[in-house]
Image: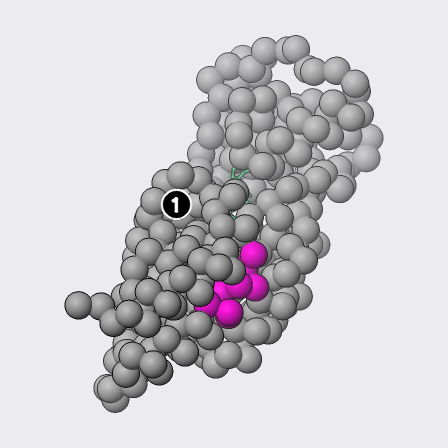
Amino acid sequence: SVPLSFFGGIGAASKIGVLVKGSNYLEALADMETIVFDKTGTLTKGEFKVTKIFPEEKQDELLKLAYLAEKYSDHPIAQSIRDAYLERTGEKAEEKVEDAKEISGFGIQAVYRGKELLAGNEKLMKKFGIVCEQYEGAGTVVQIAWDGAFLGTIVISDTIKEGSKEAIRRLKQSGVKKTVMLTGDKKTAGETVARELGIDTVYTELLPGDKVEKVESLLEELKRGTSKEEKRAKLAFVGDGINDAPVLGRADVGIAMGSMGSDAAIEAADVVLMDDHTEKIAQVVGIARKTLRIVK
Ligand code: ADP
Ligand code: MG
């Protein structure tokens, strides 16, 4: 049977708004050495805002085409483009686009005036053989192409959550050996966020499937050791849920955001942060270690 103090530990976690779905996860948290974060919506707010559009003389046209392409997408990037268009023009664009398809991790492919319209990242442009201008600054990029020609760039910025830096600092302080960030976003955008937060390792331009593979190889690396302690070492993954359910399932401990996470992610997670505060993870590690000391 499970020692009573495990319930004490789970109770203490729930008092600070963290749901731990079993005593085995408390045990795993006490041995956590690697923690892997998804970027958007987990370390950042996931609320994008259009900050730049260029070339300048094409701003209206670019924003309209992006609006039309993103009309039916529920990606936070799409919402920010629609907001920017409405703010600028005061009205919805009524022109028709056909066959709008969302390509996960790339962007949108649609048909406008009988010609192919593309709105997405540089990978999307490459996929369709469009040569575009690379944007090297911070922020997420939506490149626009129509009828086989590159037209311009919309830059969108997300902001880091207030508590993210503190969360990383406390985890490192509590003895977590490796902090990692995964993102589908481009290199410069991902690296800027990681540097700002003091995260050790960052992998960018990942498709949802690549994230599972990355976690698998990090697990392999972690468990390569031969000593008893090394063999016990655990990996946690923290995500907000959009496309993250398979990654949550693959980690030793899958941690999901309670309020902004998707139902699928909350279901797939082993630990749920009810108020989305990643700072609480270090606290739960503390509770887990205290609990384990009592049990052992
Ligand atoms: P993350 O890994 O940061 O959670 P996603 O996997 O949702 O991000 O998306 C990865 C990248 O794919 C985005 O940074 C963006 O470049 C591109 N992308 C995805 N959906 C869209 C869209 N609807 N419009 C434009 N770009 C998109
Ligand atoms: Mg995501």
Extreme front residue here?
4
Magenta-drawn segment: 277-284
Q: Residue at x 58, y 37 (%)?
A: 76
User: Residue 215 appears in which quarter of the rendering?
Assistant: bottom left
At 54% from the left and 50% from the top, the residue drawn is 275
The relative height of residue 67 versus residue 34 in the rendered view (above or below) is above
Residue drawn at x 56%, y 56% is 277
Magenta stretch encompasses residue 15? no
150 vs 3, nearest the viewer: 3
Quadrant of the snapshot with the N terminus: bottom left
- The image quadrant that residue 20 belongs to is bottom left
Query: Cβ(mark 1) to ligand 2 < 8 Å?
Result: no
Q: Residue furthest right?
A: 57
Residue 151, image x, y percentages: 67, 32
Given residues 247 and 63, the one toward you in this image is 247
Image position of 13 (left or right of 186): left
From the image, tell me which residue sits under label 1: 265
Q: Residue at x 65, y 55 (%)?
A: 160
Let me know if residue 281 is in the magenta part: yes
Q: Secondary structure at mark 1?
A: helix
Above or below residue 84? Residue 285 is below
The amino acid marked with disc number 1 is: Ala
